[in-house]
Amino acid sequence: MAIQMILCLETNKRANTDYIYIKETLDYLYQKSNQIKISIVYMNTKSKYCSGGVLKEISRKTKDYVHGETKVIYCIDTDAYEKNTKHAKEFNDIQQFCKENGYDLIWFCHDVEEVFWGKKVPDSAKVQEAEAFRRKKKIAEMSAKGLSSQTMKTCRSNILNVLDKYLTRK
């Protein structure tokens, strides 16, 4: 059965940093299939997760896909959830929103760069670092264990747990 996966990303279309890491993961670890369509919704910031514009874009992409089922997957940084109550509340609100709407949630602790590089990356270097990750094929050095965590820990993500539900590993 054909599936469209709508990935809702914190980044914007111009920077596209989050998707570079996600696409590298998809290409390196999963079999290609013409039964899988990846669509992107750029939220520009995670605080817009339930904004009218984001929900409208999800709805439009869902209606436009007539070949099978659509799965919506939010890809969210946890930020400093364990020591910042604002970050914790926002992440909990997003988790609840996803649960209520039947959406999946991929989290990156504390952010996507920390998961894939093992360190914080300054905002001013995020685009260059994402490109370097792709160019240097750093995905080959990643531990599947770190990308399939059940608990939020520094430099960990649940990305493989979610993608494994819909895709076949190589």
Image (spheres, rainbow, N blue to C red):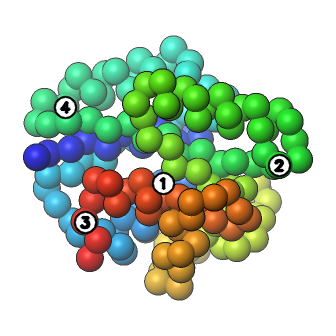
> To which residue does mark 2 refer?
82
Q: Secondary structure at mark 1?
A: helix
Which tag is nearer the camera, tag 2 or tag 4?
A: 2
> To which residue does mark 3 refer?
168
Q: Secondary structure at mark 3?
A: loop
Three-letter amino acid code of the residue under disc 1: Tyr
Front residue of 25/100: it is: 100
Q: Is residue 35 above or below residue 29?
A: above
Could you tell me how far apart the alpha carbons at marks 1 and 3 are, in whole angstroms? 19 Å
Q: Position of residue 68 (x, y in %)?
A: 14, 37
Q: Is mark 4 in CB contact (under 8 Å) with mark 3?
A: no
Q: Is residue 126 above or below residue 69?
A: below
Three-letter amino acid code of the residue under disc 4: Tyr
> To which residue does mark 1 refer?
19
Q: Is mark 2 in CB contact (under 8 Å) with mark 4?
A: no
Q: Considering only order in the chain, which callout, 3 or 2, is on the residue closer to the N terminus?
A: 2
Could you tell me how far apart the alpha carbons at marks 2 and 4 are, in whole angstroms? 38 Å
Q: Considering only order in the chain, which callout, 3 or 4, is on the residue closer to the N terminus?
A: 4
- Judge from the rendering whether residue 39 lies leftward or rightward of residue 114; answer left or right: left
Q: Is residue 145 visible?
A: yes
Q: Residue at x 21, y 51 (%)?
A: 36
Dot 2 crowding, Cα within 10 Å, few <14, some 14–19, many 20+: few
Could you tell me how far apart the alpha carbons at marks 1 and 4 are, in whole angstroms? 21 Å
Q: Is residue 44 visible?
A: no
Could you tell me how far apart the alpha carbons at marks 4 and 3 are, in whole angstroms? 21 Å
Could you tell me how far apart the alpha carbons at marks 1 and 2 are, in whole angstroms? 25 Å
Could you tell me how far apart the alpha carbons at marks 2 and 3 are, in whole angstroms? 33 Å
Q: Residue furthest top?
A: 52
> To which residue does mark 4 refer?
65
